[in-house]
Each structure stands twice: as structure tokens, then as C-alpha cells.
Image (cartoon, rainbow, N blue to C red):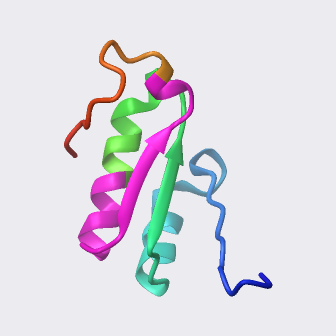
Amino acid sequence: KQSGIRVHCFDGNLQGDSALEEILKTNNFDFVGISGMITSFDYQRRIAKLVKQNSRDTIVATGGGLFSSVAFPGKVIPI
């Protein structure tokens, strides 16, 4: 907060897709980070697409347990 960086946390299990869509429409994010296990890969990809639909310039990164489980570490997976 002191450096002027705003952070917004979203929990898809608690808030749902409609809340995410509203958050994305009413905020202009420079960066969106997504975390989850490999079992949530399809959901994470869908979120990344939603982010890009609302702002093509937003950088999207995903990590956590997802990429420690992927067979090709260090590779870029297109959304």
C-alpha cells in the first residue's frame, strides 16, 4: 500500500465466476497471478482467458502446485 500497489484477492470457490467477471470489468490490473493444483488446470486456463478478454495488456501468470506437477517444467503453455 505504501508503494502505491493495489492488491485484490479472489477465491473462485467462495466468490464464483460472476464475481470474477465484475472484478475484471471494474478494475484495470497490470498483473494477475493464478495458483492451484494440476486438477484445476482447466479452470485456471478459463480464468486466464477471462482476464485477457477484459484487458489484453494484463500479464497473467500461473504457478503453485500446478506447475510442479506438469511434465514440462519451464515451458510456456498458451491460453
Closer to us: 44 or 22: 44
Residue 75 in picture, x, y percent from top left: 27, 30
Magenta stretch encompasses residue 38: no
Instruction: Tell me, yes or no, whether the highlighted magenta stretch contains residue 55.
Output: yes
Residue 45 on image: x %, y %: 32, 43
Q: Residue furthest left?
A: 78
Q: Point out residue 12 in the picture as x, y percentages from the top left corner.
A: 57, 50
Tell me what residue is drawn at x 72 percent, y 83 percent: 3
Q: Horizontally, is 70 left or right of 20 in the view?
A: left
Residue drawn at 38 percent across, 52 percent down: 47
22 and 31: which is toward the camera: 31
Give above or below for 66 relative to 1: above
- 29 relative to 79 in the view: left or right: right
Q: Which residues are magenta?
A: 48-67
- Residue 27, compared with residue 79, is above or below; it is below
Question: Which residue is located at x 77 percent, y 81 percent?
Answer: 1
Which residue of the protein is positioned furthest toward the top in this rendering? Answer: 71
In percent of the image, x 65 and y 79: which residue is there?
6
Residue 4 is situated, as x and y percent measured from the top left of the image, at 68, 87
Q: How many labels sit on residues?
A: 0
